[in-house]
Amino acid sequence: MVFSRLRSVADIGIRSLRMEDWALDRVALVTGGARRVGKAIATSLHKTGYKVIIHCNASRDAANEFAQELNCQRPETAFVISGDLSKDVVETCRRLVKEATEKWGRLDLLVNNASLFFLTPLDTATDHQWIQLMDTNVKAPYFLAQAASTHLHQTKGSIVNMCDIIGEQASPPLTIYGISKAALIMATKNLAIELGPDVRVNYICPGAVMWPEVEKEHHDVSFREEWLSRTPLNAIGTGENVADAVLFLASPSSSYMTGSCIRICGGRSLKL
Ligand SMILES: NC(=O)c1ccc[n+]([C@@H]2O[C@H](COP(=O)([O-])OP(=O)(O)OC[C@H]3O[C@@H](n4cnc5c(N)ncnc54)[C@H](OP(=O)(O)O)[C@@H]3O)[C@@H](O)[C@H]2O)c1
């Protein structure tokens, strides 16, 4: 069964569509895939049949351990690449895609998950902070998409960009982070046009699915209570909630979606 020739779930019959039918031996690159949400995404993709390229930066040990676990489950199905997406961005992105595609000779899915997150109050924000956030959160996903585009055209693959409801609604002092995610949303929409019709490009806007490990003082108990009180489903989400959306956006079930958003936020974005 060749996914690239499928036009819809109906082509193969809904009852006979199993994830394994379309995902087996396809290759996904997940940036920031060693921990937290990225790890949940890579785990789900792997469970579905994908081979996964786990990109990491500082979490090299965690990435190796994770890849080893996946390779024990199915030999030769996980591979680690590393690179700082805020340094020599264009060159780094080209190298990462080269390493990723040389491993198994194809690329079907790019998940731009890696991201920097910190507060930038206006009175103390710096040029360096601006560059770090914009390079990691926008420039790198854009140039990874550029480097991957030939490979994705060949496989009629897709890109999923991890954005944020904070890219749609102002939330100072997460100002520069929010600007970076808003820019990534706009990059997604433009790339959906530039890479169509072969390559679909969509984005996910999570609300709170895992509380941040940084900025703990800002995200203290009262912040969390206040956040949840404005969340209709009154809970934070999980990495698996996000992974389910990635699977859907990568699958033939979303074959008529590009430039589109899925919000995984428990309804938090409905209320200011
Ligand atoms: N967690 C949430 O509730 C939430 C809410 C809204 C949106 N999101 C979005 O969902 C995605 C995943 O969220 P998360 O909370 O799991 O993210 P995270 O823990 O803040 O970061 C994910 C990974 O990004 C990588 N990264 C950061 N700076 C990098 C750099 N300069 N070069 C290369 N990699 C870098 C890190 O990899 P290493 O550890 O290997 O350095 C890190 O593990 C992000 O795009 C985030 O903006 C998350």
Image (spheres, rainbow, N blue to C red):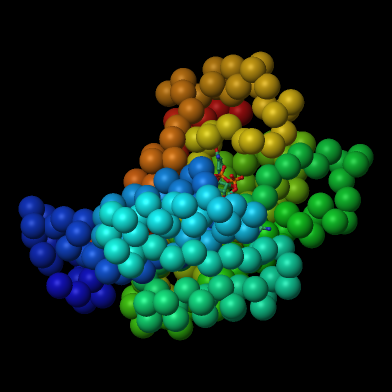
Percent across and percent down for residue 95 are: 59, 78
Residue at the (63%, 66%) spot, across then down = 83
> Which residue ends up furthest to the right in the rendered image?
123
- Asked whether 117 or 98 is in front, the reply is 98
Give the total number of marks visible in the rendering.
Answer: 0
**81 lies above or below 41:** below
**150 lies above or below 196:** below
> Which quadrant holds the N terminus?
bottom left
**259 lies above or below 120:** below
> Which quadrant holds the C terminus?
top right
- Asked whether 234 or 99 is in front, the reply is 99
Q: Quadrant of residue 20?
A: bottom left
Residue at the (59%, 78%) spot, across then down = 94
Percent across and percent down for residue 137 are: 65, 57
Image side of residue 121 versus residue 204, left or right: right
- Residue 185 visible, this angle: no
Image side of residue 151 versus residue 36, left or right: left
- Residue 121 visible, this angle: yes
Percent across and percent down for residue 151 are: 42, 80
Residue at the (79%, 59%) spot, across then down = 131
Residue at the (66%, 16%) spot, across then down = 222
Image side of residue 6 versus residue 124, left or right: left
Percent across and percent down for residue 197 are: 37, 76
**195 lies above or below 201:** below
